Amino acid sequence: MKRLTLKAGTAIRKLAWEGERLRWRLLHPVMVGARVILIRDREVLLIRHTYREGWFFPGGGVDKGESLDEAARREAEEEAHATLRDVTLLGVYSNFEEGKSDHVAMFYSRDFDLRPFTPNNEIADRRWFSLDALPAEITPSARARIEELAAGGPPRAGAW
């Protein structure tokens, strides 16, 4: 029964994801999001969604009345089961692909606690990867953010 519920939830999330992509194309809303890079011992924690391919940083949309860092903390908790003690802004990025107007605040944290993770309808996997051996399925923008974090310097702004 649990397996059937997970499959149904995954199908619903895939349909919702495609619906959101259509809405982006039709209405061109301005979206604001927050993501967080979780780093520990030369490794990065990435998640894999049930409804799209690839490895990503935890993150998502900013809710009404929520600050950027509050959104990053909430998404880290919801998607990676990580409670952040400290977050630092890496940069603010824009994504205009697929007719979108997305703006993403990218944070990082080296000070957090993790709870046990169980796959669910939204997140299929949570896994640590060496910074020297990132998965082939990591998005180019995620790879670029890791390189920027390694390079140091002040917060950045630019293309996602």
Image (cartoon, grey):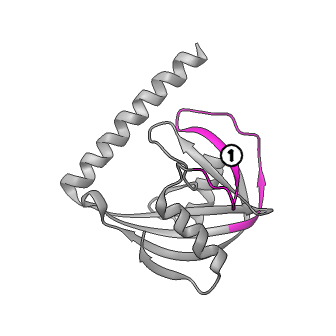
Q: Quarter of the image containing the N terminus?
A: top right
Amino acid at the residue labelled 1:
Arg
Was residue 94 drawn as part of the magenta stretch in this picture? no
- Residue name at image x 60 percent, y 18 percent: 2
Q: Tell me where residue 14 appears, x and y as whole percent.
A: 39, 35
The segment highlighted magenta reads: 109-135
User: Label 1's element?
Assistant: strand
Q: Tell me where residue 111 appears, x and y as whole percent.
A: 78, 65
Residue highlighted by disc 1: 127
- Residue name at image x 52 percent, y 16 percent: 4
- Residue name at image x 62 percent, y 51 percent: 46
Tell me where residue 124 sits by quadrant. top right
Q: Residue furthest top?
A: 1
Q: Tell me where residue 128 appears, x and y as whole percent.
A: 71, 50
Regarding residue 81, the answer to whether it shows in the image is no
Q: Left or right: where does residue 89 sit relative to residue 61?
A: right
Q: Tell me where residue 35 appears, x and y as whole percent.
A: 55, 62
Q: Left or right: where does residue 38 sit relative to residue 61?
A: right
Question: Circle 1: is it few (<14), some (14-19), or many (20+) Cα within 10 Å?
Answer: few
Q: Quarter of the image containing the C terminus?
A: bottom left
- Residue name at image x 56 percent, y 43 percent: 48
Tell me where residue 150 sits by quadrant. bottom right
